[in-house]
Structures are given as C-alpha cells and as structure tokens.
Amino acid sequence: MALSPSSGSAASNSSSSSSAARILSGLLEARTGQILSENRAWRMETALKPVLRSHGLPDMDALAARLITRKDAALEGAVVNALLNNESSFFRDLQIFDMIHRQILPQIHARRTDRTLRIWSAGCSTGQEAYSIAIQLSNDMARWRGWKIEILATDISTAAIDQAKAGIFTQMDVQRGLAVGDLIKWFEPSGDDWCVNPTLRQMIDFRTDNLFDHRAPTGEYDLLLCRNVLLYFTPERRQRVLRLLATHSHARSVLLLGAGETVIGHGDDFAPHPEFRGSYGRRIEAPVQAEASLRRAL
C-alpha cells in the first residue's frame, strides 16, 4: 500500500527523530560510558527541553544537526548533563544508612589505629548521599573527636556537583528522607529553600570526575559507596569500575552498591561481605591485591 503524503511525512519525521536520538545517546555513552536504557530514552526530549530552549533550537533533530556541524563543547556538556540521571535523596534506602551507623562505622572506628576515616561516594549526584554520611558522623562526633575524617564525593555531572557544592536544597528535597531534627540542626532556611550548615559542607570534598578517566580518588578508602551507578554500564564497563574501586580499597574496606546491583559476574575483586548484609569486601586473593603487593615490594 502506498503511503499518503501525510503518512510519509510522519514516517520521515519519526525516522529523523530516531536518528537524532541515536546521535544524542551516542554522545552520552562516549562522554560517560552510560547506556541510555529504554525507560530513560522515552523521556529524552523532555529532559532536553531546557537545552533546546536556551539555544534557540526547535527540536532534537536541530540539536543533533548542530552537534554534528559545529564543535560546541558547551552545548555538548549541556546535553550530557541533561541526559544524566541525577536522582538522589537524603538517607536513601534507610536500612543501608542504619547499617552504616550501627555496624560499619563502629567497626572501622575499632580497627583503625591511625584514627583516620576515609569515605568515597562515587556517583554522588547532587550530594545528598555524602551529606547524609556527614550528618551521621556529626551527630556522633563524640566518638570521632580527634579523628581525621575525609569524605570524597564525585560525579561526572558538572551541574550536579555545582549544586552539591552550593548545598542548597528545595523543600521537596529535604522532605525526602531527612528527619525534622536533622533539618533543624544542620540546615538553615534560605528563602523557599534550605542551605546546608557550612560546618557540614566543609566536611566533604566534592569533585567532578569520570570513573573511566579518573583523577579524584587517591589512596585507599575504608567505605566506598557506588550505588545505582553500575546499572547504567555494560558488563565490561562494570568490571572496569569495580577494578577501580578495588584499587582504592584495602583488605577491610566495605563496598556498598545499589539494591539492584551486584559484583557477581563482574570480575574477582570483590565478594559478598561476611559481616554486613548486602555489602561487599575485597577478595583476599584478588588479582588487584597481588598487584598492590608487588608495587609495595618494588
């Protein structure tokens, strides 16, 4: 059956939009390693509306054409930031933070003789996870008095890191997971928003960093959080990220992933932790440990 002119136009538009979507999702993958899943791809145009509006572009086809014909680093960055999923909340998965507070941190406190605590929040988004850890430590500061506490929080999204550094959250943000007592104690009203107490903000080193071209993490961390990050990567890239995390952990480090993530089938660096349910520890005979031992011997 021959297509009517209107049907042909619709088919052409659909094909054109599909090509634009491939170009834009390809940019995201090239810059971040993330694969745009179906449940994120359908809302691509909605996510990109602010970018289209600010650059005077009518649709995704025009945006894709602009990216192909011009080298525009600012526009590329805006597209990547718009397509990244920066979903986060305070004390997300409360049972995890309860385990951190009641089990993991006390064990680290008992075992670290140098009185140094190092925590890395990888894929920290807009900072709520790192701030939640800082709140826990600050509420228990009598235990940690005299300790050197380092919290590194990294994310590939420059927009997310800028917001995390600013420490300004909406009323909706603070209502998601933050106890009223902590809100009153650690936040100050700023118009319709809430601003993190400077003391809390100074506990965290927020940095833009790419897990596949990393520069921020140095040395080894006692607690590593990389939650709801691996699910956006291919199996090969998941293994690369886990190898990076292993490189920056020690024999007693604890790794926390998202509820739908696992180390199983993605290399031999980590195994289920024997003490903390749902967490992971370094395999004693992992290849990365042998490499570290060799480096020390040299």
Image: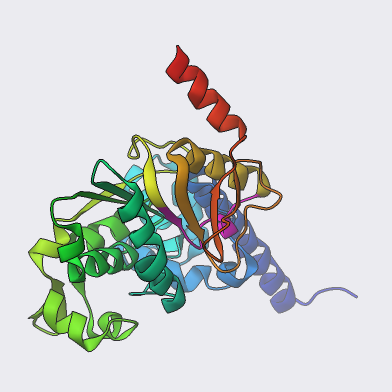
Residue drawn at the location 44% of the way across and 36% of the way down = 213
Depth check: 154 or 183 in front?
183
Q: Percent x, y for residue 20?
A: 57, 57
Q: Percent x, y for residue 103?
A: 41, 66
- Quadrant of the image containing the C terminus: top left
Depth check: 12 or 177 in front?
177
| Image-based side of 191 in relation to 162, left or right | left
Evaluate whether residue 215 shows in this view: yes
Q: Percent x, y for residue 107?
A: 38, 57
Up/down of 237 relative to 257, above or below: above
Up/down of 126 relative to 186, above or below: above
- Reply yes or no: does residue 154 show up in magenta: no
- Reply yes or no: does residue 231 show up in magenta: yes
Q: Percent x, y for residue 230?
A: 56, 55
Depth check: 294 or 225 in front?
294
| Image-based side of 229 in relation to 135, left or right | right
What residue range appears in magenta? Answer: 224-234
Residue drawn at the location 66% of the way across and 68% of the way down = 14
- Quadrant of the image containing the N terminus: bottom right
